[in-house]
Image (cartoon, rainbow, N blue to C red):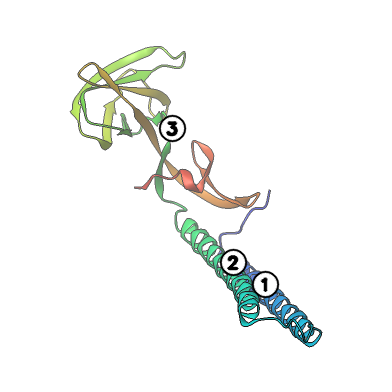
Amino acid sequence: MDFSVLNGTSSSSSTSSTTSSTSSSSSTSSTNAADTQDRFLKLLVAQMNNQDPLNPMDNAQVTSQMAQIQQVTSLSTLNTSITSLGSQLGQMQALQSVSLVGREVSVPSNSLQVTNGVAEGSFDLAGAASAVKLEILGPAGNVIDTQQLGAQAQGRQTFSWNAGTLASEGSEVKYRITATNGTAPVTSTTYANDKVTAVYSENGSLKLDLARLGSVDYTAVQAVN
């Protein structure tokens, strides 16, 4: 596991190393494109020097071959530009992720934590719903409480559940959302809030370490609270 260090010096060093690698890759691609073009021109000149005087190449043939090398050169340049852009976006993502340390984020999960007697969560509805039901589940997966949240619009919705005596302070509970529009079910996605404690890289992917939920992919973050 390749952990990235979060202090300023190490982040700067890592970014510098990545930039150097990008520059080297870009330089290599440019060199390869130039070499390809040079070889093509040499072959074209040799072909013209050794052509049959009684059956010389016409302008259309020369123009066609010149167009082919131009296409190869353009594609090589485009590939270099895309590679460079991808690397720059990766660096920006890494820098942005470091700023999430200590912040609370929302990620796909059905886990809630009771804090000051209340558990807060959110869910996303694929469409408008005329009725939404929240069910709190106990350790064995049994329903320990039910709340009717009423009609809800499409998109992200939040809720607060007062634990009372049903769950102790600091404990975790699971929940599920059942939504319908008339008799038709409405798809929902549940989210949990958790604090980011660290950011690291694993197998080329950016990961966040959350206080309760553990490791999640950076792309799993749906909102920063």
- Percent position (x, y) of residue 150? 18, 24
- Percent position (x, y) of residue 216? 52, 41
Tag 2: amino acid: Asn
Q: Which mark is residue 29?
A: 1
Q: Which residue is mark 3?
A: 109
Tell me how far mark 1 sits from mark 2, CA to CA: 8 Å
- How many C-alpha atoms fall within 10 Å of the one at disc 1: few (<14), some, or many (≥20)? some
> Which is closer to the viewer, label 2 or label 3?
2
- Percent position (x, y) of residue 19? 61, 71
112 sits to left or right of 157: right
Tell me how far mark 2 sits from mark 3, CA to CA: 38 Å
Tag 1: amino acid: Ser
Viewer-nearest residue: 41 or 187: 41
Identify the mark nearer the N-term, 3 or 1. Answer: 1
Query: Which residue ends up furthest to the right in the rendered image?
Result: 50
- How many C-alpha atoms fall within 10 Å of the one at disc 2: few (<14), some, or many (≥20)? some
Identify the mark nearer the N-term, 1 or 2. Answer: 1
Q: Which residue is mark 2?
A: 79
Identify the element where label 1 is drawn. Answer: helix
Q: Is residue 35 above or below residue 210?
A: below
Tell me how far mark 3 sits from mark 1, CA to CA: 43 Å
Identify the element where label 3 is drawn. Answer: loop
> Which is closer to the viewer, label 3 or label 1?
1
- The residue lying at 62 percent from left, 82 percent from top is 59
- Percent position (x, y) of residue 47? 77, 81
